[in-house]
Amino acid sequence: MNRACSRISFALVAAITMIGAAASSALADGDPYYSNGINPSGVRTPVPAPIPIPVEEADWYFRGDFAAGFGGSPSVNVLGTNLVESIFGSGQYSQSFEPSFTGGVGVGYIWSPNWRTDFTVDIHSIMHAEYTGNGFVGSPAVYTVAEDKTKFMSTILLLNAYYDFRTGTPWTPYLGGGLGFAVNQLTQSSTLNENGLGGATTSQRSTDVAFAAAAMVGVSYDFSSFFAIDVNYRFLHIGGSQVTLSNMNVPLYTTEVGDLNEHQIRAGFRFYVN
């Protein structure tokens, strides 16, 4: 009797041990909540899902641009009689208003997915108009070369606004416009050279502020959340200016440079600040 009970007890202990080992293995390998071990508390507790980290859009950006311009040939008028006309009556006129080049930088703010603004400062390349004459003058005749030259350059400051057409891709077409002013600098010089012995030059410089405006259409491509390239067409308007050449505080003549209306192809980049 005692031997039979001992055998039954041994069989029960062996069975319980085997069931426990099987349950532990199943819990360790097949438990969908704890695949790498046993929950020490014995209660299944789901692992919380990771909290997504929000991606914040950039608010500010810096930009740099370079443009080639064409079609901008402002009128040049002389009020009075310049040096060439006073000696020869007329002369040869030449100008270098195109092609022109503009480079600048700016800072912008993004108000919404579609609207942004920026402030830009551009430097326009120097343009000039020349009026020259040469020939024998006086008695005895002296070979004389006379030159009147007007140089024009401008610093353009614009506040621009843009509407971006979001496409869900890195490509973003946009329309824009800008208003501001231009600081125009004109230099008028007159040179007289007789018999190739060198000449005397009289020059005058003036700086004034004129109205400026622009209209843009373009597309940008975002390489990342920090960097994009921008290619666009810009129509640029710069108001005209004038400069008066004087000698001993006596006005000799005034040169007027009319409004500049230029078509530009621009390329640049933007750096976003998150």
Image: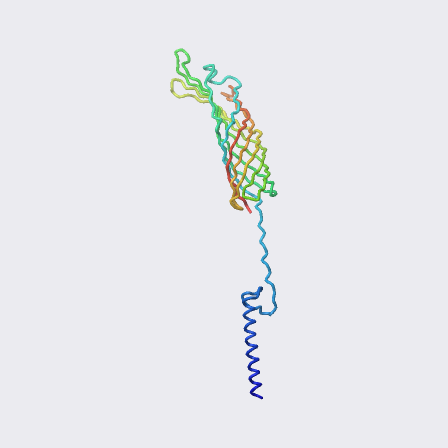
Question: Residue at point 60% right, 43% down?
Answer: 113
Q: Is residue 70 visible?
A: yes
Residue 149 rendering spot, x and y as whole percentages = 47, 23
| Quadrant position of residue 30 | bottom right
User: In the depicted view, which residue is nearer to us: 261 or 223?
Assistant: 223
Residue 155 rendering spot, x and y as whole percentages = 52, 32
Above or below 86: residue 220: below
Above or below 59: residue 4: below
Question: Residue at point 56% right, 27% down?
Answer: 239
| Quadrant position of residue 178 | top right
State which quarter of the image contains the N terminus. bottom right
Question: Residue at point 44% right, 22% down?
Answer: 201
Residue 141 rendering spot, x and y as whole percentages = 39, 12
User: In the depicted view, which residue is nearer to us: 272 or 228?
Assistant: 228
User: Does residue 131 appear left or right of residue 196 in this picture?
Assistant: right
Residue 265 rendering spot, x and y as whole percentages = 51, 33
Q: Is residue 189 visible?
A: no
User: In the depicted view, which residue is nearer to us: 221 or 189?
Assistant: 221
